[in-house]
Image: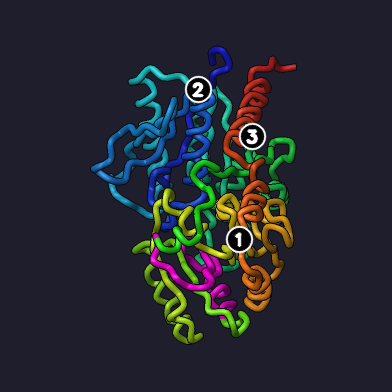
Amino acid sequence: MTDGQLRIAMISVHSCPVGTLGTRDTGGMNVYIMELAGELGKQGHLVDVYTRVHDPADDQIYSLGQNARLIHIKAGAVEQIHKLATYSHLPEFACNVEEFRKTNDLEYDLVFSHYWLSAWVGQYLQEWWHIPHLTMFHTLGAVKNTVGFGEDEPELRVETEKELARSGHRIIAPTEKEKEELVQRYGSSPENISVVPCGVNLELFQPLDKKMAREGLGLDDDNIILFVGRIEPLKGIEQLLKAMTYLKNDRCPRLAIVGGDESSQSHVEKLKELSRELGIEDSVTFFGPIKQERLSYFYSAADVCVISSYYESFGLVALESLACGTPVVTNDVGDSRNIIRQGETGYVITDNEPRHLAEKMDLLLSGPGLDKESVLKIRASVGEFAWSHIAEAITGEFRKVMDSHLAPAP
């Protein structure tokens, strides 16, 4: 470390941060890593993000902006594999990261790992490099199993998370709720957990002219309801489809569903079948995965964005929607109660019931539409979540851990 500049190794083994959003293993964590690495680089730090190479066409090194880069590391076959299958390749990944470091004469001040698979690698790197290790789990297996939707997380994940949650130098949790879960379910020490929220790119996510956005997407409906995210049972899209049938009779809304890929086609077909059973198939459009740069068009075209998930670690979609000036109706997941200003920028419901989702959607759809001042007021409500602020808070946590790590033993 020179002149306050930190040299940071970030680890994201199973999921490439530049992967297509909304697909099976890409989502909020990818956005978090990309945005944070880029912002830390802008603020003068050096950031290397290590991920497993999964495509022979990938270059080994990609620039993520000023002072930040993505480095592909071989671990197992160079192809897409299920994230749990990555576990057996973690020792190879760690060794190849170390080989890359030595070959390129690199030194780091700390390791910041993301997800339990990466935390396993980070633990070994901290021992080899004699530097602090911070981790962020993004989701917790024990909590997902409690929710009871989708596939059960394996015992391997839950037990490994429990061990890692007790052994690292610092855990970054995005919400107080997750901090409590780490303490109660995994026995983490509360003193080793810092709460720092996720952020939003206020340059990328800006309000666009609604008419222009709709024309650009080929949407001409009176009311547009938006869902953005992976297509999986945990996201509760069935509840949103059912909620459409409870909207007031004078509503003729279009539900735009953004996300999904080949791996989620079976669930998409189930949702389409449910739409037919509910008699709303003509009012539902599945757009598939959309590049992040295009999402502002969807948020701006929508009258309301709905988050019907049963579990979210934080809830980046809510931030992105509000940054575009579009109100949100959400189940009480992630940090929604701190993000949403009840009755002003949207609504938080507590039970994810379709009728209650519809009631709040109706409230937002019943008016003449938002004027420019209202849109800007909604956007201003998330100004504190700008990535520049989040990166500064994270840097503060880095320095605290480093000071503690370097402090002489009493």
Q: CA distance from mark 2 to mark 1?
A: 34 Å
Residue range of the region highlighted in magenta in the rendering: 216-244
Q: Are marks 3 and 2 in contact (CB under 8 Å)?
A: no
Of residue 36 and residue 185, the one placed in the foreground of this image is 36
Q: Is residue 218 above or below residue 401?
A: below
Q: Earlier in the sequence, mark 3 or mark 2?
A: 2
Image quarter in which the N terminus is found? top right
Q: Earlier in the sequence, mark 3 or mark 1?
A: 3
Residue 389 position, x and y percent, is 63, 34
368 part of magenta stretch: no
**Few, some or many residues within 10 Å of mark 1 (<14, 14–19, 20+):** many
**Few, some or many residues within 10 Å of mark 2 (<14, 14–19, 20+):** many
Q: Which residue is mark 1?
A: 311
Q: Which residue is mark 3?
A: 170
The residue positioned 58% from the left and 26% from the top of the image is: 132
224 part of magenta stretch: yes
Q: Is residue 352 visible?
A: no
Closer to us: mark 3 or mark 1? Answer: 1
Taking 80 as reference, is 384 left or right? Answer: right
Of residue 384 and residue 264, the one placed in the foreground of this image is 384
**Few, some or many residues within 10 Å of mark 3 (<14, 14–19, 20+):** many
The residue positioned 39% from the left and 52% from the top of the image is: 291
Q: Which residue is mark 2?
A: 7
Q: Is residue 212 above or below residue 278?
A: above
Image quarter in which the C terminus is found? top right
